[in-house]
Image: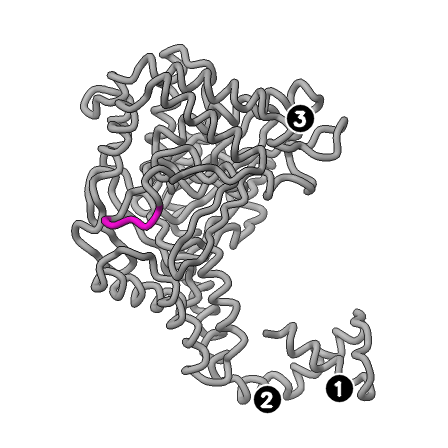
Amino acid sequence: MLDVEYALFRHERSGGFLPVEGSPALYKQFLVHLGTGGWEELLARRPVLAQLVKLAIERWRATVTELFERLACDADALSATFGVKGAPTHVRLGISDPHNGGRTAAVLTLASGRRLLYKPKDLSVDRAWRAFAAWLEVSGAPWRPVVPAVMSRELYGWTSFVETQPCTDVAEQSAFFRNLGSLLALLHLLGATDCHRENFVAHGVEPVLVDLETLLHPRPKHDPMPEAMRNSVLAVEMLPCRYIGAGDQEIYYPGFDAEWEGTASTVTPAVAPVASLRAHVGPFCAGFAAMYKFLLNHKKHLADLDAGPLAAFRDCTVRYIHRPTMTYALTLRRALRHLDSGARWTLPFAQLQHYDPRGLLDNAVATLRAAEHAALERLDIPFFTARTDATHLYWENGGRLSDFFEEPALDRASQRANRLSPANLAGQLELIHQALAGRRADTA
């Protein structure tokens, strides 16, 4: 909003011609203008802005206070778990989307220089992932994922901070993508989704998954996603794919390369300008196949939810992605252009109904839309959760839809383990090759 006001401010001083270029001096004049009546005039023209500024200040105060209260309460446990002591010298807030009252993840830098990651959400699935990785190691898996240390509390937790570290040569780059292929096999088994770049940190040859909230993603009744895609590696969203979603809208997942390629990414070695998954199909598929074959050899144990390694994921909280986060972000961006009236401010939220997932029951869709609307009005990205061994959907302030999901996500993981086979491996590898060759993967 202020960037629009600044553009208008520049235009008014352009003499009716092209707007003058921005400059530090001109921006300083703009700030002086705001401080000498311009701010009051702006709030009078855009009354919704005044409400949102008040809301943002109140939420910032509440969430920062909550963070430091939790830090003080956990000081001894943090010292024992992570070896960190003392007050932080720097806190970087807002490193994740805001959920549940403006809460976001934060990075705390301690006097020793070590960093700690604060996450204001349930981290039970992080603990389970760590236990699963330990089982992989003792069972002789071809690769064991690097897993941050975690300390879980009720509704929040702390993890060690994983530093980015670039590959140093072509061999390390190849090893990175082989390990990424192995990770895809694990994420496929666990029914993960929404695994885009922001959920990974590249630490040398290790792709470290640092956001695990969409492991064991539950499937709603009458899920609009094609069954073949839901049961394939494409559902992880590490590979590029397309399908037709609500309102006959084509849903495109660009995959890993779209996020990393062409950027100063942490997988870019000094010997090459770009580290592309498409350029490393061989090692990627080799890593996937090696891990898949290991899982195949342990399929009966994996399918056993009482005594097998997947038992660690029982009674964990995971996130349910009802719509892509980008859809919510763009909706908020459109709404923020219309702060002159409450009706215009909320209109983009109501327009989400045009993109409601097809097939879901009308009462469920209406209930979820109301929850989305309420969250967006508070400047939050809507956040829905489920338990891995149940079928109910939850959201902020006690919201619940009973039996929203077809079956518990953990049961689906057990079924996926039972489906492991040489033929299925061949089919998944073919999908990987199709996706990375730029052809539309056949999920019909």
Q: Is residue 226 found left or right of 145 in the rendered image?
A: left
Identify residue for label 3.
167
The spot of residue 77 in percent (x, y) is 38, 35
Image point (35%, 53%), residue name:
322
Q: Is 222 a magenta residue?
A: yes
Q: Position of residue 299 (x, y in %)?
A: 29, 18
Q: Secondary structure at mark 2?
A: helix
Q: Earlier in the sequence, mark 1 or mark 3?
A: 1
Tell me the chief SS of the magenta region. Answer: loop
Residue 284 place in picture, x, y as percent: 54, 24
Residue labelled with disc 1: 12
Residue that appears at 37% across and 72% down: 350
Mark pair 1, 3: CA separation = 50 Å
Instruction: Name the amino acid type tagged 2.
Output: Glu
Decide which of 174, 113 is in the foreground and name it: 174
Query: What label does residue 41 carry, if any?
Result: 2
112 versus 307 height, above or below:
below
- Vertical order, 59 against 265 (above or below): below
Q: Is residue 42 above or below residue 390?
A: below
Residue type for callout 1 = Glu
**210 or 154, nearer to the observer:** 210
